[in-house]
Image (cartoon, grey):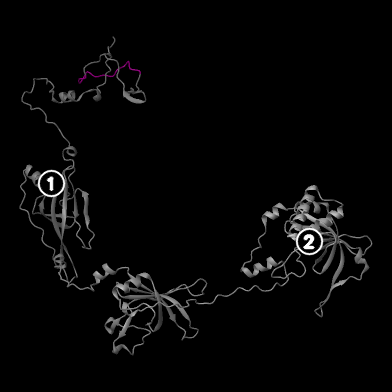
Amino acid sequence: MSINTRHGLPFLPGNSFRDLTKSAFHRAQTLDFKNGYALPRRPAVGTGQDPLLSVNISHSERNQLIRDIPNLTYGTDTHRPPPLSFIPAHAAYDKKVLRFYGYFRQEVLHSPDEHFRIRPVVIYYHLEDDSMCVTEPPVENSGIPQGKLIKRQRLPKNQRGDLYHWKDLNVGIDMSLFGTVYRITHCDAFTQDFMESQGIELNESESIPNDPYTIRRVQAQQTHITPYDHNHQLERFLALDRQVLRFYALWDDSDSLYGEKRPVMLHYYLVDDSVDICEHHEANSGRDPFPVLLHRQKVPKHIKSSCEPFPSCVLEVSPQDVEEYFSPGDFRVGEEVTLMGRRFLLYDCDDFTRKYYEQNHPDILLKPLTVDTRTQQDITKVIPPYNGFGSLEDSLQNCLSLIPEPPKKDVIKLLENDNKVLRYMARLVRVQLIWIIPLLNIVLQQHKQDSQNPLDEGRRFILSYYLSDDMISVFERSTRNSGIIGGKFLEKTRVPKPGSSVENPEYFGPADFYIGATVEVFGHRFVLMDADRYVLSYLESLSHHIPEHTLSSLRQKFGVSRTSDQEEQHEAETDGAAAVLQN
C-alpha cells in the first residue's frame, strides 16, 4: 500500500502524520542573489511548495484578509461588526505634548531677608510614552542653577508603584514628585482642548504667587535730571578724548649729587587734566629701561594750609585737601614749571599743542628755546699703538670689537692669483745683530752695519713674493762646508717698506723688485741678483702698472728686447712727453 504524499491531507486534528519517505531534513533556502542583491526564491507554480510570503501580498489584499470572516462549521455570524483599523500610540501621539504651568515653594532657613521662595516650573507630559519632565524657566540674576529639574521619565504616583497618567492631571491640584510638591496653576490651549476632547473638565486657572525676595530686589529706578554743565565728565570724554598736549622739557637736576640735565617729554591729557612725564633715553646711555618718571595723575598746584606741614615729596593728600590742580594755562613754552618738587624747563611743543593754545589761550605766548639736549659728549675712539705682535690688521680687530673677527680678505684676488709666486735670487749685504741676555734683561742691537763675517758673502737666499696675498718668504740655500744650516729664513708674512708708519703702512709690491734692488726685510738687507723667467712674462702682462726700469733690468738680465707692440707704445709715450716739454 502506497501513500500519496504529494498533495498531502488537510491540516486538521487527527489527519497529520510523519512522512516516512522523507530523506532530506535540511532547511530550505529562501533567498537568491541576483546582481549582488538578496531576493526571495519563488518555486515553480503547481509544485505545491509555494510559501505564503507577505511581501507578495498587496496592501489591499491584506486588508481584505482582515475583513473576511471565515465560515464556521455550524453557520455564519451575521451580527458581528467589521473590525476597526488599529494605529499604535507612537504614531498617533507623535510630538504631542501636554504643557502645564505651576510652581513649588522652597523653604529658606537661617536668613533674615527671606523665609521662602516661589519658584515657577513647567511640566511636560509626552502622550506617546506617558513620560514627564519638569523644567524651571531661567530668571535673570537669580543666582540659582536653573533649567531641567526632573529629566524625562515615567513618574511614580504613590508608594504602590502606580505611574502618573494624563487622566490624573488637572489644573488646581498638587503633585508630589520625589518629595517636592508642585502646584499646577494653568495650562496652554492645546492641553485644554485635548483634555476637554477626552471628557475631562479642567478647573479654574490660578495665578503664580509673587516671590517676596524678587519683589524686594526690584527697586524703582530713580530718574535724575542732570543740569547742563560745560565741564560734564561724559561730555568732556566725548569731546576731548585722546587729545593730549605734548611739551618737550629739560629736567634740571644739577643741584643734587652727580646731577645733570635730562631731556623729558611732558603730556597733559585734556580729558581729565592728568599729567605724566617720560624720560628720553638715548642708545647706550647706560640707564635702566624705565622711561616713566611720573605716572599719569592729576598734579596739585595749591594745597590747603592745613596740609602744608605734610611732606610734599610723599603727597598722600586727598582731593578735599587740594585747592587747585595744574591746568593748560600753567604750562608756558619758554618758562620753567615745578612739578612734584622738580623743575622742568619747557623749551618746545608739538604742532597740536601750538594750535590748541592759538585757539583756546591766545593770550599765552609760546617762546621756543634752543637748548642742548645731549646727555653725554661724543667720545672719540682712539686706537692704541701697535705692539708688534701679529699683523696690523689682526691686531686692529681687538680694538674694534669685544669678540674680534678675522680681517677680511680680497677673495677675488685670492682666486685669480692662487699659486702664482714671483721668485728672486738674493744675497745678504747687511745684518742686524741682536744679543739677548735674559738674566740682565738687556738687548744689545747693532743697526744697519755691514757684516764683517766673510762667510756671509757666500750665503744665497730665495725671496718668494706671493701674488694672492702680497706676502714674502725667504729661504736660505744650503752651501756645502759653509758651517751654516740652510732652510727657512723668514716665514710667509707681509713686509712693510722702510720708513713707513704704523698708521699708514706701505708694503712691498711686484714693482719694487728688480735686478740690483736692495730690499730691507726687518733689518736685513738683500740685493736681488736673479729672477725666474715667469717674473718677466708676468710683469710684461701688467706693463702699464710696472715702472720701465723694473722691466728693463729684467730684460737686460735675460737678454730679451722689447716686442714691436712695446716699441710702438714706448715711442708714443716718448713723443708725447717731448711734445709736452716743447709746449
User: Is residue 159 visible in the rendered structure shown here?
Assistant: no
Magenta stretch: residue 187 in it?
no
Residue underneath mark 1:
166
Q: Quadrant of residue 39?
A: top left
> Which residue shows up at 78% across the image and 63% down it?
491
Magenta stretch: residue 19 in it?
yes
Kind of element beneath mark 2: helix
> Height in image: 105 above or below 257?
above
| Amino acid carrying mark 2 in the image | Asp
Name the residue furthest top. Answer: 1
Q: Quadrant of the N terminus?
A: top left
User: Residue 70: percent from the left, percent from the top?
Assistant: 13, 22
CA gap, disc 2 and disc 1: 124 Å
Query: As drawn, is 360 to the left or to the right of 120?
Result: right
Residue nearer the viewer, 521 or 4 = 521
> Height in image: 519 above or below 129?
below
Name the residue furthest front. Answer: 583
User: Is residue 371 visible in the rendered structure shown here?
Assistant: yes
Q: Which mark is residue 512?
A: 2
Between tags 2 and 1, which lies in front?
Answer: 2
User: Residue 503: percent from the left, percent from the top?
Assistant: 69, 70
Q: Quadrant of residue 357?
A: bottom left
- In this picture, which residue range is highlighted in magenta? 11-23
Task: Please report whichever mark, 2 or 1, sits nearer to the chain's N-terminal start.
Answer: 1
Q: Principal SS element in the magenta part?
A: loop
